[in-house]
Image: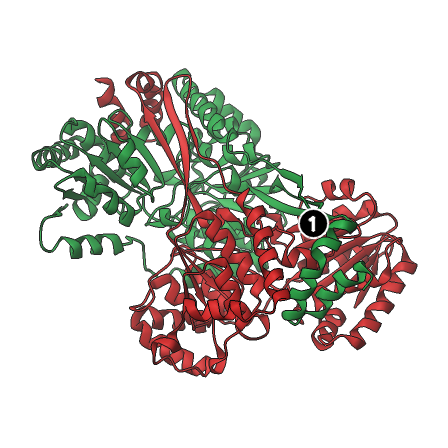
Chain colours: A red, B green
C-alpha cells in the first residue's frame, strides 16, 4: 500500500505516476488473438472444436456439448434455494426498472421552413454476451449485460461461456433463465468472440458483443470493433473512496477490500482529511485481510496497488478524483452533494455513508459494467443505448427544398462536388 | 455497373456477395500505424516535425508553421463571399438546432424502498477533430463534427489538419471560426491522431477523437480506441435509392452520382420495380458522367460498384435494405412512410421525391457523419452523445439498505465474494 500526503513536496509527481499507471497487461496477446480470429473466420466450427479442446479441455461433439438448453437453464433456476432465487429476482426487477427509463425517445417534427426532421431508435437484431468461466463467472454480470439488451428490444440474445473440463456454473444458468437469454454456447476465449462476430455454421453472427473477459477476450473485441459493436474495452476494476474521519473504519476498510478481492490488479484508493482515521482504516484492512477467504487476492491487490491519500481538506478531493476518473467513487460524508457535483469524471458514484459500492454491484439498479482505467473521462457504463442505434431522417417538401436548397448548392460548388449541387438544382428546375 | 433482378435464379447469391463486399482496404497499414504512434508517444513534437516534413512536405518550425491562429480563421471568414458566408451560417444554425435537441436529460429520483438513483450527463473535457487535407477537406465536415461537440459543452475543441506543402484550405478555416474551434494544428495522418491521444509538449491530449480520414487515420483511431473515445471506424460512403417509376430519371441519376463522385470506392445502389425506369436512369447516369467535372471518380465508382436491382414489387425493398444496412437510404415514392418503418438498418433516411441526400450532407440539420459498410446494423450517426458521458449514482438511506441489503449479501456469498458481502453486512450491524 502506498501512502501519500498532498502536502508532501513530491506529491504532485507521485500522484501523476498513480494516474498514469494503467495496470493493464502489456503482453503481446494481439498476435495470438489475430491468429485465433482468422482460424475461426476460415474454419468455423472445426476451429472452435479444436480450440475449445485445447484451451478448455472440453470436447464439442454432441449437441449437448455445444449448447446448454433452455430447459437446463430452467432446471438450474428451479434448483435455486428460495433465498437465492428471491435475491436474483429482486436484482433482475430492480435492474430492469432502472434500465427501462433509459430507453431513448424518437423525434419527429417539422421546422419553420417545412422540413420534416427526426430520428428513430431501434434495437440491434442480435447481441452476444460473453460470460467468463471459472472464478469470474458471476450471475450478476449476466443480469447486468442481458437485461439492458432485452429492455432495448433485442430479439436474439446469445451467451457464450467456457465450460472448463465440462464444468457448468449453475447460478449463471439460472440467471440466463431469468434474463430470457435465447442461446447459450459452451465456448470461450477469443475464439468465442470470433464466432459471435463472424458466425459459423452452428452459430449465427450477432451485431453487438458485450461482457467482461480476460486479456484475450478484450483484445478480440478490440480487433473486431467495427465488424460488430462492442462495449468499452475494460481493464481491472477500481474504487476511490472519499471519506471524512466520522466514518467507521470497519465500513471503509470493507469497501476498499470489496474491490481488492476481485483481482490482484484491482485498485482501491482512499482519500481522507483525517490522518488518524487513515491509520485506523489501514489497521482494519490488515485485520480483515487475515480473516478474509479471498485474502490472498485482496492482499496482493492492496499491497501492490492500494493507496491512501491524506489531504488537508476534502475540497482537494474533486481535482484528484477527476484526474483518476475512477470506475467507482464513494463519497462517504454527511453531505456528499457538493463533492459529487464537483467530480466530473466517474463511472458511478455512491453517495453517503450507507451506500457501499457492493450494493450497486448487485441490485441497486444502475449497471455495474463501468469504464475502468481512467476511461470515465470519455465513456459511460453499459446501458440500453449500447444495444440500440439511431436512424436520422429528413423529408423536404417542395417549398422547404426551395428555401434551403440554394445554400446547399453554393456549399457543394465551393467544395468541388458538382453532382451534389446538381441533385438539388434539378429539383429546383435549375 | 452491376444489374440484378430479384426474379433471376442466381439473385440470392449475387446479392449476398454484394452484402459481403466491404470495399475496404485490406492493405496492412496496421504495422506502419503502430510504428508511427509509438514514435509520437516517445518523441512527441520531434516525431511530429519529422513525419510532417516527410508526409506533407511541410516544415514545423515557427509557431505559424505549427498552428493556425484564431485571427487567421476569422480573416478567412471575413474574406468569404456573402453568398458562401450566408450558406455556412445557415448550415451552422440548422445543424446546431437539430443537435441541441439531442442533449440527454439527467435522472434523479427516489424509488419505493427509499433508494435515490440517477444519472448525470457531462461533456468530455477536450475533443479532437480530424479534418483531411486535399480533396476531402470539406467545411461541411468541420461543422458536422465541431458543432455537436460545442453543443455538448466541450470546452476545448482541437482541430488537426494536414497542410500539404503549406497549403491551407480557407473555407475550412472559415468554418472553424463559425463553429468556435479553439485550436487548429497543422498536422495530419496517424501522427496527428497519436498527438491528440497521447499529447505532446505543444499539444495537450484530448479525450475523444472524431472526424473522417484515410486508411492510416482510421487505423490509428482504431488502435487508440480505449486510450481515447472515437467515433465509428468509417469506410467508403454509400447510398441506396429506392424509387418507383414515377420519378424523373434525371433526379435519381443525380442522386446516385452525388455519392459516386466522393470516392472511387463509394457505392450507389438503385432498387426499383420499374425496368424501363431503370434503363432510363442508367442511360441518364451515362449522359451525366460525360459532363460531370468529377466524372473520372464518379465513373470509376459507378462502373465498379454501382448496382441496379429490379424487383417485382417495392415491398421486397426493406428486406434488401436491411441486409445492406446502408449509410444513406433514399425512399423516392409518394408515400414513403410504410417502407421507411420497415427498414430497420440505415444511417439516415431521405423521404419522398424532394429530399436529395445532398441536402442532408450540408444543412438539413441531422449529422452527415454516418455508419458505413453495414455498420448501421449496430452504430448511429455522430451526435452530441459522442462528446458526453454519463455518471450513474446511488444513495441509500439506512432503511433502503436494510430493505435490499440482505439480498445483496446472499448474492455476494453465492459468488464467492465475502468482502462484498461484508461491506453491506457491517452497515446492517451484522
10 Å neighbourhood of mark 1: few (<14), some, or many (≥20)? many
- Identify residue for label 1: A349
Looking at the image, residue B73 sits to the left or right of residue A372; the answer is left
Quadrant assignment for the C terminus of chain A: top left
From the top left corner, tell me how far across and down residue B298 is, in percent.
Answer: 22, 39
Q: Which corner quadrant of the image does residue A9 belong to?
A: bottom right
Quadrant assignment for the N terminus of chain A: bottom right
Image vertical order of residue A173 relative to residue B87, above or below: below
Looking at the image, residue A14 sits to the left or right of residue A73; the answer is right
Q: Residue at x 55, y 40 (%)?
A: B158
- Nearest to the observer: residue B382 or residue A330: A330
Looking at the image, residue B243 sits to the left or right of residue A233; the answer is left
Label 1: chain letter: A
Q: Secondary structure at mark 1?
A: strand
From the top left corner, tell me how far across and down residue A285 is, in percent.
Answer: 82, 68
- Nearest to the observer: residue B411 or residue A36: B411
Looking at the image, residue A150 sits to the left or right of residue A382; the answer is left
- Nearest to the observer: residue B408 or residue A81: A81
Count the labels in the image. Answer: 1
From the top left corner, tell me how far across and down residue A173 is, in percent.
Answer: 50, 68
Q: Which corner quadrant of the image does residue B381 belong to?
A: top left
- Residue B312 visible (yes or no): yes
Q: Residue at x 31, y 30 (%)?
A: B358
- Residue B200 visible (yes or no): no
From the top left corner, tell me how far across and down residue A24 is, in percent.
Answer: 60, 66
Amino acid at each position: 500500500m502506498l501512502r501519500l500526503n498532498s502536502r508532501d513536496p513530491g506529491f504532485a509527481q507521485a500522484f501523476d505516476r498513480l494516474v498514469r499507471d494503467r495496470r493493464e497487461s502489456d503482453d503481446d496477446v494481439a498476435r495470438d488473438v489475430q491468429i485465433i480470429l482468422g482460424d475461426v473466420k476460415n474454419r468455423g466450427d472445426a476451429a472452435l472444436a479444436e480450440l475449445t479442446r485445447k484451451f478448455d479441455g472440453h470436447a464439442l461433439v454432441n449437441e449437448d456439448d455445444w449448447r446448454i438448453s433452455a430447459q437446463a437453464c430452467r432446471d438450474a433456476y428451479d434448483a435455486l434455494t428460495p433465498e437465492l432465487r428471491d435475491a436474483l429476482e429482486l436484482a433482475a426487477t430492480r435492474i430492469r426498472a432502472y434500465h427501462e427509463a433509459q430507453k431513448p425517445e424518437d423525434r419527429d417534427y417539422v421546422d419553420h421552413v417545412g422540413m420534416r426532421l427526426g430520428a428513430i431508435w431501434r434495437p440491434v437484431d442480435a447481441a452476444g454476451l460473453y460470460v467468463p468461466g471459472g472464478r469470474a463467472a458471476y450471475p450478476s454480470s449476466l443480469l447486468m449485460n442481458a437485461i439492458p439488451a432485452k429492455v432495448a428490444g433485442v430479439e436474439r440474445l446469445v451467451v457464450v461461456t467456457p465450460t472448463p473440463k465440462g464444468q457448468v456454473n449453475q447460478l449463471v444458468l439460472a440467471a440466463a433463465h431469468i434474463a430470457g437469454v435465447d442461446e447459450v454456447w459452451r465456448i470461450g476465449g477469443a475464439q468465442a468472440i470470433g464466432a459471435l462476430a463472424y458466425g459459423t455454421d452452428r452459430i449465427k453472427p450477432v451485431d453487438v458483443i458485450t461482457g467482461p473477459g480476460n486479456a484475450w477476450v478484450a483484445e478480440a473485441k478490440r480487433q473486431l470493433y467495427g465488424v460488430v459493436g462492442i462495449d468499452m474495452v475494460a481493464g481491472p476494476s477500481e474504487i476511490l473512496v472519499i471519506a471524512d474521519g466520522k466514518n467507521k473504519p470497519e465500513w471503509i476498510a470493507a469497501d476498499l477490500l470489496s474491490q481488492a478481492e476481485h483481482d490482484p490488479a484491482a485498485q482501491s484508493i482512499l482519500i481522507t482529511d483525517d490522518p488518524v482515521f487513515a491509520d485506523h482504516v489501514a489497521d482494519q484492512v490488515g485485520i480483515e485481510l487475515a480473516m478474509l477467504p479471498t485474502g490472498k487476492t485482496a492482499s496482493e491487490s492492496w499491497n501492490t496497488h492500494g493507496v491512501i491519500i491524506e489531504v488537508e481538506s476534502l475540497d482537494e478531493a474533486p481535482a484528484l478524483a477527476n484526474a483518476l476518473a475512477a470506475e467507482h467513487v464513494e463519497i462517504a460524508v454527511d453531505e456528499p452533494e457538493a463533492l459529487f457535483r464537483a467530480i466530473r469524471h466517474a463511472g458511478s458514484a455512491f453517495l453517503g455513508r450507507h451506500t457501499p459500492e457492493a450494493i450497486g454491484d448487485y441490485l441497486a439498479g444502475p449497471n455495474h459494467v463501468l469504464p475502468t482505467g481512467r476511461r470515465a473521462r470519455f465513456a459511460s457504463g453499459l446501458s440500453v443505448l449500447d444495444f440500440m442505434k439511431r436512424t436520422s431522417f429528413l423529408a423536404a417538401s417542395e417549398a422547404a427544398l426551395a428555401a434551403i436548397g440554394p445554400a446547399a448548392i453554393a456549399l457543394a460548388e465551393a467544395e468541388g462536388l458538382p453532382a451534389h449541387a446538381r441533385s438539388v438544382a434539378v429539383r429546383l428546375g435549375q
